[in-house]
Image: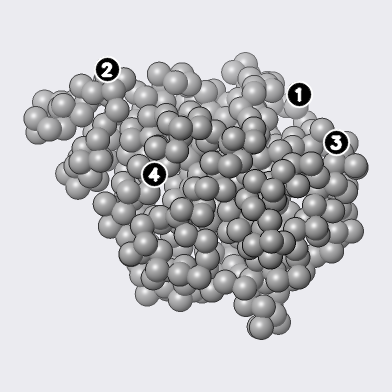
Amino acid sequence: MIETTHISADLKQIAAKVKAGQRITDEEGLLLFNTASPGFVGSLANEIRERLHGHKVFFNRNFHIEPTNVCVFSCNFCAYSRLYAQREEGWELSIDQMLHLVKKYDGKPITEVHIVGGVHPKMNLQFFADLLKAIKAHRPELHIKAFTAVEYDYMFRKAKMSVEEGLRFLIEAGLNSIPGGGAEIFHPEIREKICADKVDAAGWLLIHETAHKLGLHSNATILYGHIEKFEHRIDHMRRLRELQDKTRGFNTFIPLKFRNKDNDMSHVPESTVVQDMKMYAIARIYLDNFPHIKAYWPMLGRQNAQLALSFGVDDIDGTIDDSTKIYSMAGSEEQTPSMTTTELVTLIKQAGRVPVERDTLYNEIKNYSHAGQEEKAGMN
């Protein structure tokens, strides 16, 4: 129930729009950021997520491969990558090494491998096509969600291929969908300050639009809580909403919290938990054409991920299995991000929600609404 007794007429109008299933404007989105209480936006967002999904919270069984943290780019917010010229702390995995990581999950009910990393000048389009082919040859049913738009932009330009040609080449090799990384903040005023040398907003959006036209689904992200203003967040989400109106190819939107550990922006304070919850809630309200809003539990921490389930979030990603360094190196709440399915199901149930295992495209695999079902699923 949305309490509207002590709020302004403008906010009451937004609440009425949400109840009627109507789209809010950019100005109304800004108003929510600037004047609305966390409780108000949380109630609105929760009404939308329950209209869409009831009490379901989605997760999947996945693991990550990070081919390298060596990168030709130097984003100011990044604590993960190591410049190509300074590789002492870097790693570069061969195809055999990455295939070995895949084989570790033989016989386990994993449905997705998520492949992202730095932009390495020697890991080219053919290298990654060979990697995808090797994974598919070993485990054909495994869904490959791979490479950010930043990685695609570099490898396609280096291969002298168009975006469509490059994506078709990788689809033929086994690519199934695209993660949402590299979006950061689209507005050029901010992008120029935090990641000036990598693909711009138009390039990012073109890659995702082309992927959608070729039948691939993708995700979208925003990096928030640093030097951007609320209007930059709205501008970012508007561009995504407009593309989604056009293609309907995005599965989920993932707000990523800026972390200030070990990077060139360590002087910038991090957002508070209250501000984080408002970001999730307003994203759910504004992005009316996105089916899902996801919170990465390793980045937020388990308790805050539970809290986010009351602020519009209906997905908390997967079991992860401690196979990623991106979160921990950036100063995430979870320094060893691994949860069994049983633990993840328990976490969701503790928040009063219904755990639902999904595949990458949100087809439901198992509903854990009945007590004891998590034990039957095993520990992976």
The amino acid at mark 3 is: Pro
Q: Which residue is more in the foreground, 346 or 169?
A: 169
Q: What distance separates the C-alpha of mark 3 from that of mark 1?
A: 25 Å
* Quarter of the figure with residue 266: bottom left
Residue for badge 1: 376
Q: Give how far across and how far down residue 319 sits, in percent.
A: 66, 41
Residue for badge 3: 140
- Can the viewer see residue 378? yes
Q: Nearer the viewer, mark 4 or mark 3?
A: 4
Dot 4 falls on a residue whose secondary structure is: helix
Q: Give how far across and how far down residue 118 sits, in percent.
A: 65, 65
Q: Earlier in the sequence, mark 4 or mark 3?
A: 3
Quick check: 280 above or below 163? above
Q: Tag 3: Cα neighbours inside 10 Å, few (<14), some, or many (≥20)? A: few
Q: Tag 1: Cα neighbours inside 10 Å, few (<14), some, or many (≥20)? A: few
Q: Which residue is more in the foreground, 125 or 267?
A: 125
Dot 2 falls on a residue whose secondary structure is: loop
Residue for badge 2: 20
Residue for badge 4: 239
Q: Nearer the viewer, mark 3 or mark 1?
A: 3
Q: What distance separates the C-alpha of mark 2 from that of mark 4?
A: 23 Å
The amino acid at mark 2 is: Ala
Taking the image as shown, residue 173 lies to the left or right of residue 64, namely right
Quarter that holds the N terminus: top left
State yes or no: discs 1 and 2 in contact (Cβ < 8 Å). Answer: no
* Quarter of the figure with residue 119: bottom right
Q: Earlier in the sequence, mark 2 or mark 4?
A: 2
